[in-house]
Amino acid sequence: MGVVVIDGSTVRDFVEDEAAFTKSVDEAFVKLDVNGDGVLSRAELRKAFESLRLIESHFGIDVSTTPEQLTSLYNSIFDKFDTDHSGTVDHKEFHDEMRSIMLALADGLGNFPIQMAIDDSDSLLQKAVDLETSKTTSSP
């Protein structure tokens, strides 16, 4: 786990660097596509969100959420990604929604730097920080 300082411009610059962002999203998609069929099923996307435990805890404290509530929430998240309502999420849908999520996060952060603990070196936020760091360390 690492602690980083991040603000909205770090995230926005990462998303706007199309090559770096696309490469990172492609890598994330491949990891989530467990059966390798080129699309994400409802189960594959749900497993990814369950692993983040964003819903089952609040400020690190476990909260009681019924299985029905979780299923409803995960289904609504899946539906947000599945814009063509095909029952699967293809690469473009995943890329577009991750872009929207990251830009919303950038807007929420604004210009106020925060410290954040990131325990996944492959997370998009970590990659945003890595991109910014590479730009500052390669400057003359």
Image (cartoon, grey):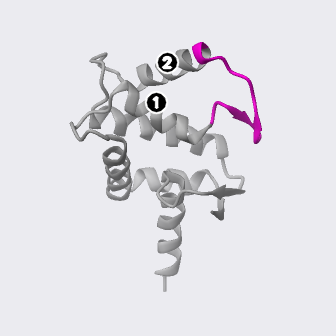
Picture disc at residue 112 = none
Residue 57 belongs to the span the image colors magenta? yes
Image side of residue 49 versus residue 26, left or right: right
Q: Which residues are magenta?
A: 54-68
What is the x, y in percent for residue 96? 37, 36
Between marks 2 and 1 in the image, the one whose residue lies nearer the viewer = 1
Mark 1 lies on a secondary structure that is helix
What is the x, y in percent for residue 25? 37, 48
Where, by quadrant of the figure, is residue 118 drawn?
A: bottom right
Image side of residue 60 versus residue 7, left or right: right
Query: What residue sits 51% from the left and 23% below the top?
Result: 74
User: Within 10 angstroms of label 2, few (less than 14), some, or many (20 or more) residues?
Assistant: few
Q: Which residue is mark 2?
A: 76
Query: What residue sits 22% from the left and 38% below the top?
Result: 38
Query: Residue 103, relative to residue 7: is it above or below?
Result: above
Picture disc at residue 46 = 1
Q: Total number of numbered labels?
A: 2
* 75 or 129: nearer the viewer: 75
Disc 1 marks a residue whose amino acid type is Arg
Query: Residue 135, relative to residue 46: is it above or below?
Result: below
